[in-house]
Amino acid sequence: MSLLIILLAACQGRPGQGELYVYTDAQGNLVTIEKPEPEPDDSQSEPDRKVEGLSLGEPLEDYRPSEEIDQELAEKERDRFITYVDESGQLVSRPVDMVAEREAQAASAEPDYAEVSRGEFLETYRTIRQDCCLHLLDGASELAAGEEMLITFDRHSPVMLGDEPLMAKAVKLAEEVSILDLKAFIRKSDYVAAQLLWLDGEGRPVLLIDQPFSRKYPETWYRYGYLQGTLPRESGQRHLVVFLPYQQEQPSTDGLQAVMKGELLLSAQ
């Protein structure tokens, strides 16, 4: 028995060997077996061991700066593809430059306005007194570049001097104003069909504009339709008088109705 214990101790003392188990089998024999050594643990992957072996000062081979990744993502975001069935029945997918597509659509799109035909208007003649608007200048509001002014007409509006008491509004323009933009809003089919009269520094008429509108914009879900015209300001034109050349509502051009009450928007540049 002592010899067996010595042998067991010698076996357990061998370096590199596993543990020994001793038991008695069914026949009463004493059996000694060796438990095999455990296999190496593969739960730690090779990349993990490689990273553990690196010092903080060593650069990673797969490292990419964030700017490069952001640029790549932005380029991928711009990539768009359109898929369609061609004439032969084949399914085709091709890249589309969305920016270029939008620019092409904008260039080929029809304008959202209609040109006001000059052929529908006849040449007119109106007698205007030299002192027609002097009394209007005292209450004239000044309009500077970059500003807007809403002009309204109603039964309390002042009138020009002359054969007919035509409702009028005078505006004093700042020196830096070079361009005027006039809009007449269309409500259903009614609008204010105004005319414009330029005055010099002394308040005397120098130019009559019979038809100030050149474009017609249709009504949309968020705004009224309107007529629009752009007027350059020439030397010697100091004041502007906006007036109605009629005294009662009457049919106008393009199926519209010229009315006595309404609004005009005057913008200066």
Image (cartoon, helix red, strand yellow):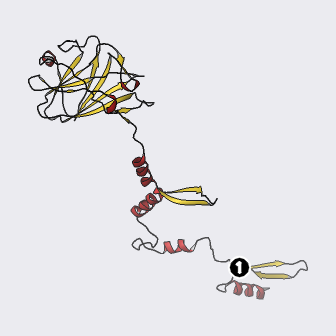
Residue 176 figure quarter = top left
Residue 258 figure quarter = top left
For the N terminus, give its image quadrant: bottom right
- At horizontal 79% and vertical 79% (from top left) the residue drawn is 22
The answer to whether residue 227 is above or below residue 83 is above
Nearer to us in this view, 220 or 191: 191
For the C terminus, give its image quadrant: top left
Disc 1 residue type (three-letter) = Glu
The x and y percentages for residue 132 are 15, 17
Residue 45 figure quarter = bottom right
At mark 1, the secondary structure is loop
Task: Write down the residue under mark 1.
Answer: 19
The x and y percentages for residue 164 are 22, 12
Nearer to us in this view, 90 or 36: 90
Residue reaching furthest to the right: 27
The x and y percentages for residue 11 are 71, 86
The x and y percentages for residue 125 are 22, 22
Instruction: Count residues near mark 1 (Cα–Cα under 10 Å), then give few for <14, some for 14-19, many for 20+.
Output: some
Nearer to us in this view, 47 or 11: 47
- At horizontal 85% and vertical 78% (from top left) the residue drawn is 24
- At horizontal 69% and vertical 83% (from top left) the residue drawn is 12
Q: How many marks?
A: 1
The answer to whether residue 225 is above or below residue 261 is below
- At horizontal 78% and vertical 81% (from top left) the residue drawn is 33
Nearer to us in this view, 90 or 150: 90
Residue reaching furthest to the left: 202
